[in-house]
Amino acid sequence: MPKPRRTPAQGEPQPHAGVSARTDHGRPDRHELVPVRKASDILPAYRGTPVERLLRWQNLGEDVGPRRTKAELLIGMCMDNRKVMRTPENYAFVLRTGGANLRRVEFKVSFAVAIGGVKAIALVGHDHCGMLGLPRRREEFVRGLVENGGWDREAAEEHFDSWVATFDVNDTAEFIAEEAERLRRRYPKVLVAPLLYAVGTGRLAQIVENRPN
Ligand SMILES: [Zn+2]
């Protein structure tokens, strides 16, 4: 399955939707956000697929229609409580994890593909993700686990330290694009769409890789 790419025409504004064009290291972003404000904004690779239907329901407010008889899509998304996806009953398997990181839940992805028969995965990251810069939140995490979870401080520190590298996210769009690429290699017959959810509007944007100039 070819991965979606898009090269902006010369002079075309870069629809970055709040994401800066340059990263901290001064190089141009490797990824661009393509918003969906009308049906024609949907990338050709997604047209006629379960991903197009999700984008139409979520962004264009189209009627989701009646309940389905079987699932068409696996939605992998962050467990963050601020996100809701519009789909009809039975339409999608949903796997929610910190940062939409599916590395630790691969068997469930395989189940949705093998038994559930889904042909597409929408991998949905979001802005203001709590998994961004996780190492800086060590004290908050440890204190919270002691106070709210009833853990010993030492055990909480050890818990954080042993998992932080697995779940830390540096740049959401880049992480989602890389995770999508990994899933494409793992499930070559499945369409994988990296998307970014804006918490303020509830809308999805398509993450595409910029071609090197
Ligand atoms: Zn998140």
Image: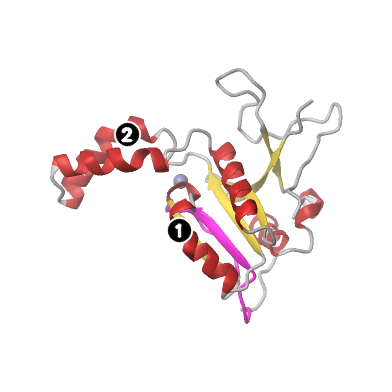
SS at badge 1:
helix
Viewer-closest of 8 and 179: 179
Residue 65, image x and y in percent? 67, 74
Q: Is residue 16 left or right of residue 85?
A: right
| Relative image position of residue 146 (x, y in whole percent) | 17, 45
Quadrant containing the C terminus in the rendered view: top right
The residue positioned 67% from the left and 23% from the top of the image is 28
Disc 2 crowd rating (10 Å Cα; few below 14, some 14-19, many 20+) is some
Q: Nearer the viewer, mark 1 or mark 2?
A: 1
Residue 173 magenta-highlighted: no
Provide residue 206's location: percent of width, then percent of height. 68, 46
Percent position (x, y) of residue 120?
Answer: 66, 62
**How crowded is the residue under tag 1: few (<14 C-alpha within 10 Å), some, or many (20+)?**
few
Q: Amino acid at mark 1?
A: Val
Provide the residue designation for mark 2.
137
Which residues fall within the magenta stretch? 68-87
In the displayed orientation, state which residue is furthest to the right. 10
Q: For residue 48, which quarter of the picture?
A: bottom right
Q: Is residue 92 visible?
A: no
| Residue that appears at 76% across and 33% down | 211
Q: What residue is shown with label 1?
A: 105
- Whether disc 1's CB lies below 8 Å from ligand 1 is answered no
* Upstream in sequence: badge 1 or badge 2: 1
Horizontally, is 193 left or right of 138 in the view?
right
- Is 1 left or right of 202, judged from the image as shown? right
In this rendering, the answer to whether 30 lies above or below 105 is above
Look at the picture and state if 27 lies above or below 203: above
- Within the image, what quadrant is residue 58 found in? bottom right
Q: Secondary structure at mark 2?
A: helix
